[in-house]
Image: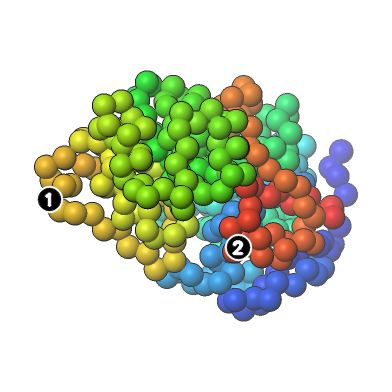
Amino acid sequence: MAPEIPKEQWAQVFEKTGGPIEYKKIPVQKPGPDEVLINIKYTGVCHTDLHALKGDWPLETKLPLVGGHEGAGVVVAKGDLVDSIEIGDHAGVKWLNGSCLACDFCMQADEPLCPNPLLSGYTVDGSFQQYCIAKAAHVAHIPKECPLDGVAPVLCAGITVYKGLKESGAKPGETVAIVGAGGGLGSLAQQYAKAMGLKVIAIDTGDDKKKMCEELGAHAYIDFAKSKDVVKDVQNATEGGLGPHAVLLVAVSEKPFQQAAEYVRPRGTVVAIGLPAGAFLKAPVFGTVVKMITIKGSYVGNRKDTKEAIEFYRRGLIKAPYKIAGLSELQSVFDKMEKGDITGRYVLDTSK
């Protein structure tokens, strides 16, 4: 028996770039032929959502816009062409809401690089609402034994860092430095790295973040604000002082992106994941050449990456450190995010 779907719902909406955000009632949309309607129970808050609000990136947002792209909930309606998921199944709304499925990139499992993507909470309304539309082909299938609040951060942060670790090429027993290790992305990156057999050097600042990183099993913690020489400290934390085999950059400021090529070991790989507004990657040409360093970007994962990342969570290998707040409290979460006062991640309960 299909659940009763209300005509209106609570949502966080901004009408113009820069805000303000307005918590108000809006209509519940009906899914198209290839879409599903998901009753969002919990949704994570990602730094990308703040970038969308502020207009930090050279990509126009839909206006008015409902942000959010880490929504976990229950399928309550679906279009006539949908046979890959059923009403009552648990599903997640990811950053990639939909793609054409026909271009060269989509056909080779690089659908995040589709030239005409639908991006949740950016070019289409996202998960900061109680009912959200998504393309059935791209929703995350969530096993029912996974708690929806706990799995929500995996839908962007988890998938993104898991993809980045795969792109780094780091092998079990090798060392990866994670810059921004105490944040939402970094806390998950540490756990995926550990589950993949990697040693972690956590780089961040603050005693709370140090404590969390040590509890997550970091091999070493470098506080960049207290360190007199971050490059040397990172290298000294590795065997032979050669530096880590890979660096994952999930920081939200530019400076760490400039340092990474200096401390990564010869033939190491620097993977840029975070997207600081207006930032540039710079590296010394001489050192990059003679050390044969690889510098690359890593975007969000594809559908297979999504399935694998959620499976790590289902098996109990990943536990996203998070705090619960109400959907109505989104602005206060953004305020803390701007101040750098968040350890781990915030997950919003859409019923509050």
Residue at the spot 54% in from the left edge and 58% down from the top edge: 48
Residue at the spot 25% in from the left edge and 47% down from the top edge: 262
Asked if residue 136 shows in the view, the reply is: no
Q: Which mark is residue 24?
A: none
Q: Secondary structure at mark 1?
A: helix
**What amino acid type should be assigned to the residue bearing mark 1?**
Phe
**What amino acid type should be assigned to the residue bearing mark 2?**
Lys
Q: Quadrant of the N terminus?
A: top right
Whole-percent x, y for residue 260 in the image: 32, 47
Q: Secondary structure at mark 2?
A: helix
Residue farthest bottom in this picture: 16
Residue at the spot 39% in from the left edge and 38% down from the top edge: 177
Q: Which mark is residue 286?
A: 1
- In this picture the colour scheme is rainbow
Using the image, determine if residue 214 lies above or below residue 34: above
* Image position of 256 (left or right of 151): left
Instruction: Write down the residue under mark 2.
Output: 339
